[in-house]
Image: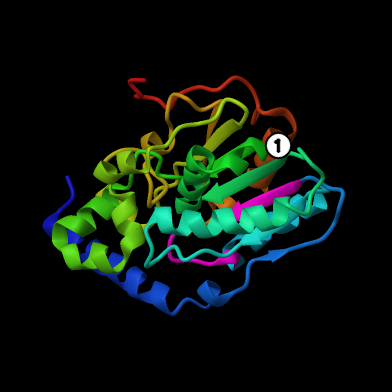
């Protein structure tokens, strides 16, 4: 059971994180496309309160493996997921319009970036071009931490609108559905050594619970021993992403997390 003192401390740290996101230089970094045609194009989407810079390590791993990384910068702090997804769809259209007709692309998102990808796959016609998608530490069933913030202050989630989209009760409003032509895998972390992770009762990466990353329609699912801030930048994760882009599997057949009722 989490003590009231720890809850107050952790929520204070979360508030500091929210405010700090306003001044994060990564928010001003420009998403860029590295031109290495005819390599397969992979769109990278960062998480909440960050910018394209946080996906640079993964972009480097992908390019070393022969892919063309398109690192997209989105307003994932003060905008709802739906609004950020509209911007993402425009950027995707700009890129795919210059590709060969029917040439498939792939997408990889960290945390909230994975929800942007799922929203895109659910609502925009260009989803037909996406044959692979990987969701890294994505709160597919919502974020309990975002829900806690909402309980403390409506003003906070109104201001930091991305958090509002992450509340467990708001995920259904995204109306997410996975297209048959897209193979989707998810990677969760279980190294819950971040302070905010102590507010979560179940296995987690310090920000997102493992059971929130998993959902039954996934084509593959894996758990790795990393926390939320490092999972998308580790070479081991990059190797799994590359394996999935090539084969549609991380290693073997997908298994649900322990304790899942699905």
* Quadrant including the N terminus: top left
The image shows a total of numbered marks equal to: 1
Dot 1 surroundings within 10 Å: few (below 14), some, or many (20 or more)? many
Residue 138 in view of the camera: yes
Q: Position of residue 183 (x, y in %)?
A: 61, 30
Q: Is residue 96 magenta?
A: no
At x 21% / y 54%, what residue is drawn?
148
Vertical order, 46 against 224 (above or below): below
Vertical order, 60 against 242 (above or below): below
Vertical order, 5 against 182 (above or below): below
Q: Which quadrant holds residue 77?
A: bottom left
Q: Position of residue 262 (x, y in %)?
A: 36, 20
Q: Is residue 51 magenta?
A: yes
At x 54% / y 67%, what residue is drawn?
51
At x 82% / y 45%, what residue is drawn?
100
Q: Which quadrant holds residue 151?
A: bottom left
Residue 137 in view of the camera: no
State the residue in front, 229 or 182.
182
At x 56% / y 53%, what residue is drawn?
89
- The residue pinned by badge 1 equals 245
Under tag 1, what secondary structure?
helix
Coloring basis for residues: rainbow
State the residue in front, 142 or 9.
142
Q: Position of residue 78 (x, y in %)?
A: 37, 67
Name of the residue lying farthest toward the left: 4
Magenta-colored span:
41-52
State the residue in front, 205 or 59.
59
Give the side of residue 150 with respect to residue 222, left or right: left
């Amino acid at each position: 059971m989490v003590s009231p003192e720890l809850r107050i401390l952790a929520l204070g740290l979360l508030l500091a994180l929210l405010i700090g996101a306003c001044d994060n230089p990564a928010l001003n970094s420009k998403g860029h496309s590295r031109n290495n045609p005819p390599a397969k194009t992979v769109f990278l989407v960062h998480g909440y309160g960050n910018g394209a810079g946080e996906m640079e390590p993964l972009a480097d791993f992908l390019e070393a493996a022969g892919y063309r990384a398109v690192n997209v910068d989105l307003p994932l702090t003060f905008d709802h997921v739906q609004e950020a997804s509209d911007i993402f769809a425009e950027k995707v259209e700009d890129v795919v319009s210059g590709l060969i007709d029917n040439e498939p692309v792939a997408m990889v998102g960290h945390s909230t970036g994975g929800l942007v990808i799922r929203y895109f796959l659910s609502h925009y016609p260009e989803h037909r071009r996406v044959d692979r998608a990987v969701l890294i530490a994505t709160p597919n069933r919502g974020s309990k931490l975002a829900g806690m913030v909402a309980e403390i202050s409506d003003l906070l989630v109104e201001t930091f609108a991305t958090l509002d989209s992450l509340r467990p009760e708001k995920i259904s409003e995204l109306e997410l559905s996975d297209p048959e032509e897209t193979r989707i895998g998810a990677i969760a972390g279980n190294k819950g050594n971040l302070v905010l992770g102590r507010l979560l009762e179940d296995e987690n990466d310090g920000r997102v619970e493992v059971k929130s990353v998993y959902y039954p329609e996934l084509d593959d699912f894996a758990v790795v021993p990393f926390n939320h801030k490092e999972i998308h930048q580790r070479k081991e994760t990059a190797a799994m992403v590359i394996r999935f882009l090539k084969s549609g599997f991380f290693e073997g057949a997908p298994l649900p997390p322990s304790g899942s009722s699905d």
